[in-house]
């Protein structure tokens, strides 16, 4: 009687000979041999088009960062944190309510009688003149008043052009109230924004006998003097605005970290490129059995 293993091998040989045209000459299956694909004469559809393979290398940002990121301090100037605030004091001693005008360098509208506008760091006239040649952007405003009822009067952000157009945006100070403002005479709004050019002005109705103090924080400005140095005229403030509330100031100055470590950026750098041709995929072997030499 024949051995069971020999009989099983005969069935395997017959099945593989029927459904596979591979010529077995070696003891084991050779991965480098080719199969008949049935697509002879259609090599264009069998092989994919040539493509370019890139060999890349990832570098830590650090010293290479300036090479791959143009939005740096080398191209955009930096505003000194000690030179970015305007403290504007407005007083009304006229005996009646009157409209005060802040900025508005082109128009240079006169203040109503009894209304005075002063800038603690310099003068209102100097700020007006500077806004013509070096416009700036305000981001953040602190407003304190001697009478809380003054907050009922809205602020009007006005833009007036020489051609006669006049655009007015209304800002309500009481919309900025929050639990962080502990006193009724103070409002601190970090979201207040205003462009200050020769065309822009801030107008509001000030009550009689009231003193209003604004503290504006400069976020960006144009420094035309940089043209003489061949540098970008734009300058930005990188330091966060100080509110005087420790819990908010610490939150704004804290940089996001992971596990206490500052994340490191990786920069992708292409080392070289070379053309590569894709190789044809072999069909999976049918039958699923490994030919074994008979003993």
Image (tube, rainbow, N blue to C red):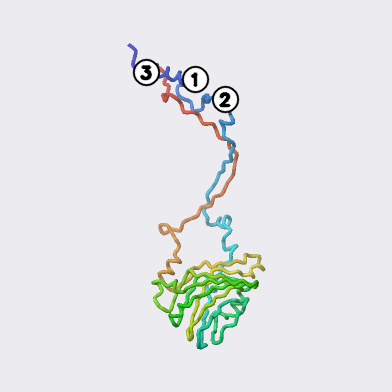
Q: Which residue is mark 3?
A: 8
Neighbour tally class for label 2: few under 14, some 14-19, many 20 plus, Cα within 10 Å: few
Image-based side of 120 in relation to 1, left or right: right
Instruction: Give how far across and how far down residue 205 sits, in percent.
Output: 51, 80
Q: Is label 2 in contact with label 1 (beta carbons under 8 Å)?
A: no
Instruction: Give how far across and how far down residue 221 sits, in percent.
Output: 58, 69
Q: Is label 3 in contact with label 1 (beta carbons under 8 Å)?
A: no
* Of the two numbered discs 2 and 1 in the rendering, the one whose residue sits closer to the viewer: 2
Tell me the CA gap for discs 2 and 1. Answer: 18 Å
In the depicted view, which residue is nearer to us: 261 or 81? Answer: 81
Image-based side of 106 in relation to 287, left or right: right
Q: Which residue is mark 2?
A: 40
Residue drawn at (47%, 70%) of the image: 190
Does the rendering let one see residue 133?
no
Tell me the CA gap for discs 3 and 2. Answer: 35 Å
Numbered mark located on residue 23 in the image = 1
* Of the two numbered discs 3 and 2 in the rendering, the one whose residue sits closer to the viewer: 2
Instruction: Give how far across and how far down residue 65 sits, in percent.
Output: 55, 56
């Amino acid at each position: 009687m024949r051995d069971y293993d020999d009989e099983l091998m005969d069935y395997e040989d017959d099945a593989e000979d029927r459904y596979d045209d591979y010529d077995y000459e070696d003891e084991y299956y050779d991965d480098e041999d080719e199969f008949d694909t049935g697509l002879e004469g259609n090599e264009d559809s069998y092989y994919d088009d040539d493509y370019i393979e890139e060999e890349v290398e990832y570098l830590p940002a650090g010293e290479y960062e300036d090479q791959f990121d143009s939005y740096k301090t080398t191209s955009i100037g930096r505003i000194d944190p000690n030179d970015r605030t305007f403290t504007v004091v407005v007083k009304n001693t006229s005996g009646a309510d009157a409209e005060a005008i802040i900025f508005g360098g082109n128009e240079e509208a006169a203040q109503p009688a009894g209304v005075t506008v002063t800038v603690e760091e310099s003068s209102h006239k100097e700020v007006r003149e500077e806004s013509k040649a070096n416009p700036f952007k305000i981001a953040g405003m602190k407003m304190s008043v001697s009478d809380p009822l003054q907050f009922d009067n809205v602020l009007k952000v006005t833009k007036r052009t020489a051609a006669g157009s006049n655009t007015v945006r209304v800002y309500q100070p009481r919309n900025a109230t929050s639990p962080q403002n502990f006193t009724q005479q103070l409002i601190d709004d970090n979201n207040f924004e205003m462009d200050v050019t020769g065309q822009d002005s801030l107008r509001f109705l000030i009550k009689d006998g009231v003193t209003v103090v604004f503290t504006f924080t400069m976020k960006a400005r144009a420094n035309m003097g940089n043209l003489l140095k061949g540098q970008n005229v734009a300058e930005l403030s990188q330091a966060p605005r100080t509110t005087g509330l420790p819990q908010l100031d610490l939150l704004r100055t804290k940089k996001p970290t992971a596990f206490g470590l500052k994340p490191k950026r990786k920069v992708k750098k292409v080392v070289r490129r070379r053309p590569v041709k894709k190789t044809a995929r072999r069909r999976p072997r049918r039958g699923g059995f490994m030919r074994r030499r008979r003993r």
